[in-house]
Every structure is written in C-alpha cells, then in structure tokens.
Amino acid sequence: MAAGILLTRVLGFVRERVFAHYLGNGPAADAFRAALKIPNVLRNLLGEGTLSASFIPVYARLLERGDEAGARALAGAVLGLLTAASAVAALVGIALAPVLTDVVAFGFQGPTRELTIRLVRILFPMTGLMVVSGWCLGVLNSHRRFFLPYAAPAVWNIAGIAALWLAAFWDRRPASLAVALAWGTVAGSLVQVLIQLPACARLLRGLPFRVSTGVPGVREVRTAWLPVVLGAGVAQIASVVDTQLGSLAPGGVAALGYAQLLQSLPISLFGVAVAASALPELSREAGRADGLGMLRERLGAGVSRIAFYVLPMAVGYVLLGEPLVAALFETGRFGPEDTAVVAGLLAAYGVGLLAQAATKLLASGYYGLQDTRTPVRLAIATLVGGTALGYWFLTRTGFGVAGIAFGSALGAWAYAVLALAGLDRRLGAPVIGPGERAGLVRIGLAAVLAAGAGLAASRFGGEAPAFARAALAWGTFGVAYLAAGAAFGVAEARSLLQRVGIGRT
C-alpha cells in the first residue's frame, strides 16, 4: 500500500511543480484550487474515507463467514447507490456553480470568480468517477489487494501533467492553462477508474451493479455510513472554511494547497496506509473471543509504526521546511516570497502531523468495534474548535495564513488524545503501553538530534542551488535519524539499516 501511495505522491509532486511553474501563486492558481475543493467535498463525503469505514467492515465479515454470494450482492448494491447519488449531486453542483463559488471562496471577485465558476462546472463530473474509485478501493482492500487502488491515482497526476504541458504549446495564459488542467483532471479520473474495474470484476465474478436498498447488509452499511458522513461533513466544513479564509488573502488558497500536499504525504504514506491495511483485520479480530486483546496490540503496534516514520517528518517540516519548499516549487511564476509563505504553513502543519496521521488508525479501531458514532462526536468537537482557533490566529495574531494550519494542528492533537482515552476504556488497557511510550520518547530524541544535523548541513550549503541545499539538509537529516534511532535501540531503525547491509542481523 505504501508503495502505491509513494508512486502516486511522487507523481503528485511532479504535477505540483509543473502547476507552480505555469500558474505560480497567482489568481488562476487560486481559482483552480478553490474549484477543485468544491467537488472534492462531495467526493470525500461519498467516497473513500466514509465508504471504508462503513462498507469494508460489513463486506469483510461476509467474506470471513464464507458468504461470497452475499458479499457480491452487497458490493453491487453499494456501487449502484453510490453512482446514483453522486450523479444527482454532480448535476446539482454544475447548476449551482456560481452559488457554490460564492460560498466557498467569497473573497474572489471579477475574473477570478468567473474562472472559478467555469472550472467548477468542468470538474464536477469528476465526483462520480472518484466515488466509484473509492468503491473499487473498498473491494480490493477487503480482498487484501492493496497496491493497485493506491497506485491508480498516479494516472490522475500524469493526466494533469500532460494537460498543462501540451496546453502550454498553444496558450500560456494562466486562465487558459487552468481550464486545460481541469479537463485533464477529469480525463485522469476516468482512466483511474477504468484500470481498477477489471480487478474488481475478477474478484466479484462480474460487476453486479444494481440500485437497491433491500440487499442484506445494505441497511447495516447505511446505518454505519450516516454518522461517518456527519463526521466527514464536519471535516469538509472545516476544509471549506480554510478555503474561505484563504480567499481573503491574495495567493492564500494556492499556498494552502502547496502546503497541504506536503502535509498529506506522510499521512497518506504511513497513517492512511497503516489504518487502511489494518481495518479489515481489526474488523475480523473484533468479532473473535480474544479479539479485544489482539485489536489493542495491533493498534499499539500501528501507532509505533506510524510514529517512527511520521514524527521525524513533523520535526523536519517545522525546522527544515524552507529548503524543501524551494527545491520542489520555486520555478517559473513561483518565487522566493511564495516559498516563505508556504514554508510557514508547512511548519504550522508539522506541529500536528503525528496526531493527524495517528487519528486515521484510531478511528479504524472504533470502526472495527462497529462504533462509528464516537469518531463523529470527536470530529465535531475538535474540528470546530480547531477551526475557531485557526480563525483567531489568522485575524488576531501575526501568524497570517499559517494561523489556519496551526489551529488545525491543535485540533488534531485534541482528537488524538480523546480518541486514545476512549479506546483505553473500551479495550481495558492502554493502547500505548509502557513499551510503546518508551519507544516514542526514543524516536522523538532521534528526530530532534537529526534535525539539528540537518540545520547545520543546510547552513553549510549556503548559496547552493535550492535542490542541492534541500538534498544536503534532508539527506543529512535522514541518515542522522536512522543512526540515532539505531543507537537509541529503535527496532524499526535497526531493521532498516540491516536491510541495507548495515548493522548486525
């Protein structure tokens, strides 16, 4: 799974560098980011995240019982209902594009607003395609097929890159390039679905598409799905508010997009990967006689695994963000001033990075227990609080746009702490026991020491080109982190070093 996500994310960075080169941080970039946000809200409500929480546990238990016919019927009914719902929503979204634009990006005026409306209308059909892609992911993950659904979005990025590159031969005006990118994005979504459907058809012995609520299991999925959608709805509202606040500052929406791409990389690679691969197993284990103990052990091991990879990235984003942003995005219309803004946002996101990655796994723990309501309550409380803090930091302090990200980080930590406390009570013992706590301390110390080495290397780089300075700083940071982790007895660090022939086996 991590390999599939890595492939997609690497191409995503290529896509964003091309985006930065042609559109920079200007009005057309703002318009495209805002336009993509609007259909993505619907995609996130109907697609991968909510579908995984409600569909996979029911589908996986049917497979565990050997009821392949029931699982097949359930998958077909869910596909039919999702397709119908997303098609209707897409038509409504196209019709209401001006209203939605004024709600999501109320700071836009004149040509920027008009371009955003046009882009929303082009992009909205993507919603239904991505919802079907989320259904494919649920089916494939339940059958322990992880690479394809997480590598498939790579073609989405390739299509965007090709669209921008080809359009630049005819018309380099930012608005025209943004329109070309929108069409390429829709085409990429279609191909993303088409390359997954054959694998799903083989597993299901065809595509049993039907629009029906009477199939056994649909009611259970729907019952679990509604509270998850409410929780996701809160998250999407918070995301929309971020865009609204960003639209008040020129380049704010685009800057948030660049920073969020980097923020989401470790969360997707490790937080989502660990949580999504664990969810079918958590669902199976929760139904066994000794399942609670096994579930607790799996959650504790998952948190430790996530922390080993995500905590150093969090420290690096806080202390070494500037050379990384410059190396990735500083080209064409994206200048040093834009680098400073995005680096500040990245540092603020870094504060909450570990909590945001861990919440995916903690929520899966509740889903495995067939409790979809508790994560919703936590999401409502902490996301609303985080959004309020973001607004306060933005308007009452000198944080600027970075205040939005800092409020989100604090909200993520509140969610993680409360979710852990609830799981500890449900499972009868701490998810993060003494051994896991000691491991987290060692990982944190190794990350801080490595960041110091990375900072020294960055200063040594001086006036070197941005890519060379970033490679020196982050390369030193990575080597120092593995060395310090191994010296402190972190098992994952020693294992990685042994795999490359360093250290004793």
Image (cartoon, rainbow, N blue to C red):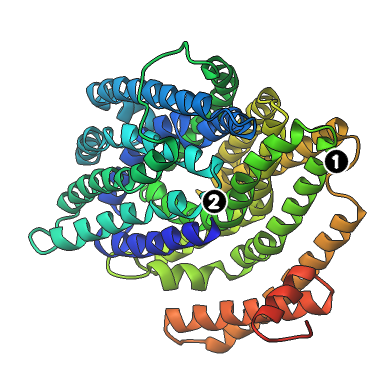
| Residue 296 sits in quarter | top right
For the point 52% across and 28% down, the residue is 71
Asked if the residues shown at circle 1 and circle 2 are in contact, with their CB atoms under 8 angstroms apart, the answer is no
* Residue that mark 1 sits on: 293
Q: Position of residue 176 (x, y in %)?
A: 15, 50
Q: Nearer the viewer, residue 467 or 51?
A: 51
Q: Nearer the viewer, residue 203 or 263?
A: 203
Identified by mark 2, the residue type is Ala
Q: Which mark is residue 9?
A: none
Give the SS element for disc 1: helix
User: CA–CA distance between discs 1 and 2?
Assistant: 41 Å
Q: Is residue 33 visible?
A: no
Q: Nearer the viewer, residue 39 or 501?
A: 501
Give the SS element for disc 2: helix
For the point 66% across and 38% down, the residue is 364
> Mark 1 or 2 closer to N-term?
1
Q: Is residue 302 visible?
A: yes
Whether residue 80 sits left or right of residue 349 in the image: it is: left
**Residues packed near mark 1 inside 10 Å, few (<14), some (14 to 19) or many (20 plus):** some
Q: Position of residue 59 (x, y in %)?
A: 56, 30
**Residues packed near mark 2 inside 10 Å, few (<14), some (14 to 19) or many (20 plus):** many
Q: Is residue 264 above or below residue 452?
A: above
Q: Nearer the viewer, mark 1 or mark 2?
A: 1
Q: Position of residue 102 (x, y in %)?
A: 32, 28
Q: Quadrant of the C terminus?
A: bottom right
For the point 35% across and 42% down, the residue is 197
Q: Which mark is residue 402?
A: 2
Identified by mark 1, the residue type is Gly
For the point 91% across and 40% down, the residue is 429
